[in-house]
Image: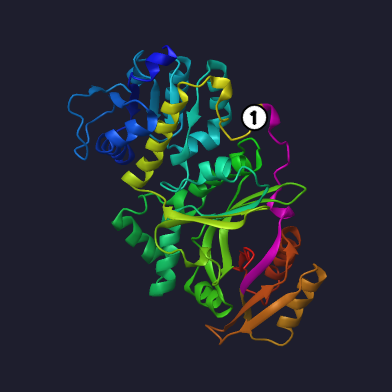
């Protein structure tokens, strides 16, 4: 296509997948077609849809529809393939097929990018096409563009975010309603916030996919999903929620990425954060991400992390950016992860044992002399000091003890907890939750 022709010819888009996000994307593209055309400089046309079935939530009259999604990837008319089928295996094959056929890619698939992004980016580079994936993280919040462009002047110190709405909804309802995890999970499933199999949400896999992508753009490191530490929220109890509140904290399921100067931390786990932090006030299914840059300081991005049109907002923004870029030579465009491929960092990803932070501990002990002295001795032997401790009323013959520690290396904490759990006088179901102040 000649550049002068590109100014008037429509950008032809093919959409693979017509589920919640796919139908939302169709609706936004159609409803805002005039404004989008003004932003791009030429119309965006949905020329081909690949979907197993139609979706009554959107109007696709007059649009070519194929039941074979690969027909979209090989359609010579298509400029941009929008992958919205989800999953990894078929999506990977579809995207690589489209790239080989010269299509630019827009996707909302965090698992695909986190697990296969390095391969996909290499294939795209070899074929002179681009890949955009803003919608893969935090729905309608433009967090990736903010990191890669708006905050590009900064050295990013850390990123911490509530990046899974299901987990945040569960913890919010546990706190506000005084209800147990399982009860709130079942409610979340009935409301459509949680899947029938909620593992990806409540055990941190979904958040880890997103954190992998965020960290790559924040620190210029290759995508390394397999090195993210994951811990879920299923063991959090009402007792933990109330105890955290007594100490002035709330429990949030966070994705945290930090540049320590000697390696990168990548971890997803329940976290106590001070009530006065901005992130602490984020409730329900909403998402929020805090970023600390050396020049700008701490900033926070808040909004809907899922849903048809919030996610479609990010998908269509990528389509618009891609439409603009079609008139620019490939080598002059912004890189997939915001850094040139030959300038990616080889900073190591730290193991969880190398992480230092404060801890909340909950344990149940027998009401006998010397028990607390043994516990404090073990903590001291492992270089752990106690900041605060509360001993509660006896429950079923056991005394609940809750304590907050000063900052300690995770490996030392693991050794101490193993020794404490081995004591005959201590119930071995010890709960520990990491603490982050987020510069509060």
Q: Give percent across and percent down for residue 213.
A: 55, 41
For image coordinates 77% across by 72% down, the residue present is 378
Identify the coloring. Answer: rainbow
SS at badge 1: loop
Q: Nearer the viewer, residue 124 or 433?
A: 124
Relative to residue 324, is residue 177 depicted above or below? Answer: below
Q: Nearer the viewer, residue 439 or 228?
A: 439
Q: Is residue 341 left or right of residue 275?
A: right
Whether residue 83 is visible, yes or no, is: no
For image coordinates 64% across by 35% down, the residue present is 222
Q: Nearer the viewer, residue 256 or 296?
A: 296
| Residue 311, quarter of the rendered image | top left
Give the position of the C terminus as an image quadrant: bottom right
Q: Give percent across and percent down for residue 375.
A: 73, 76
Q: Nearer the viewer, residue 137 or 369?
A: 137
| Residue 1, quarter of the rendered image | top left
Q: Give percent across and percent down for residue 293.
A: 64, 52
Q: Give percent across and percent down for residue 125.
A: 57, 21
Whether residue 357 is visible, yes or no, is: yes
Whether 377 is among the magenta residues is no
Q: Is residue 366 left or right of residue 165?
A: right
Relative to residue 119, is residue 59 depicted above or below? Answer: below
Whether 354 is among the magenta residues is yes
For image coordinates 62% across by 44% down, the residue present is 218
Q: Is residue 310 left or right of residue 227?
A: left
Relative to residue 177, is residue 85 depicted above or below? Answer: above
Q: Is residue 245 left or right of residue 293?
A: left
Residue under label 1: 340
Disc 1 crowd, CA 10 A, few/some/many (<14, 14-19, 20+)? few
Counting the numbered discs, the total is 1
Q: Which residues are magenta?
A: 342-362
């Amino acid at each position: 296509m000649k550049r002068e022709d590109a100014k008037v010819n429509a950008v032809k888009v093919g959409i693979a997948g017509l589920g919640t996000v796919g139908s939302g994307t169709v609706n936004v593209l159609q409803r805002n077609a005039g404004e989008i055309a003004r932003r791009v400089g030429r119309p965006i046309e949905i020329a081909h849809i690949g979907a197993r079935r139609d979706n009554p939530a959107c109007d696709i009259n007059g649009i070519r529809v194929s039941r074979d999604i690969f027909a979209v990837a090989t359609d010579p008319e298509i400029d941009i393939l929008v992958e919205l089928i989800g999953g990894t295996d078929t999506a990977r094959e579809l995207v690589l097929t489209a790239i080989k056929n010269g299509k630019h890619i827009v996707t909302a698939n965090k698992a695909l990018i986190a697990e296969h992004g390095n391969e996909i980016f290499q294939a795209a580079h070899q074929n002179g096409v681009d890949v955009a994936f803003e919608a893969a993280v935090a729905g309608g919040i433009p967090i990736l563009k903010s990191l890669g462009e708006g905050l590009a002047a900064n050295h990013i110190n850390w990123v911490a975010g509530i990046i899974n709405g299901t987990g945040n909804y569960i913890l919010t309802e546990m706190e506000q309603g005084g209800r147990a995890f399982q009860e709130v999970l079942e409610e979340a499933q009935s409301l459509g916030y949680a899947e029938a199999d909620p593992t990806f949400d409540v055990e941190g896999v979904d958040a880890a996919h997103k954190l992998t992508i965020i960290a790559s753009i924040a620190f210029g490191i290759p995508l390394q999903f397999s090195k993210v530490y994951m811990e879920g929220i299923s063991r959090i109890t009402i007792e933990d929620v109330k105890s955290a509140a007594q100490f002035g904290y709330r429990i949030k399921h966070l994705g945290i990425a930090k540049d320590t100067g000697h390696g990168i931390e990548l971890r997803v786990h329940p976290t106590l954060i001070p009530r006065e932090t901005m992130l602490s006030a984020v409730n329900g299914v909403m998402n929020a991400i805090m970023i600390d840059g050396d020049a700008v300081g701490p900033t926070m991005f808040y909004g809907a992390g899922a849903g048809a049109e919030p996610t479609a907002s990010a998908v269509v923004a990528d389509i618009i950016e891609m439409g603009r870029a079609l008139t620019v030579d490939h080598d002059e465009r912004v890189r997939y992860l915001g850094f040139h491929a030959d300038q990616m960092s080889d900073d190591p990803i730290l193991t969880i044992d190398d992480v230092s932070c404060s801890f909340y501990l909950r344990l149940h002990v027998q009401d006998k002399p010397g028990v607390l002295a043994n516990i404090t001795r073990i903590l001291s032997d492992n270089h752990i000091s106690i900041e605060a401790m509360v001993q509660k009323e006896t429950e079923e013959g056991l005394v609940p003890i809750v304590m907050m520690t000063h900052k300690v290396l995770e490996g030392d904490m693991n050794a101490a907890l193993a020794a404490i759990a081995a004591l005959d006088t201590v119930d071995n179901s010890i709960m520990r939750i990491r603490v982050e102040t987020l510069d509060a």
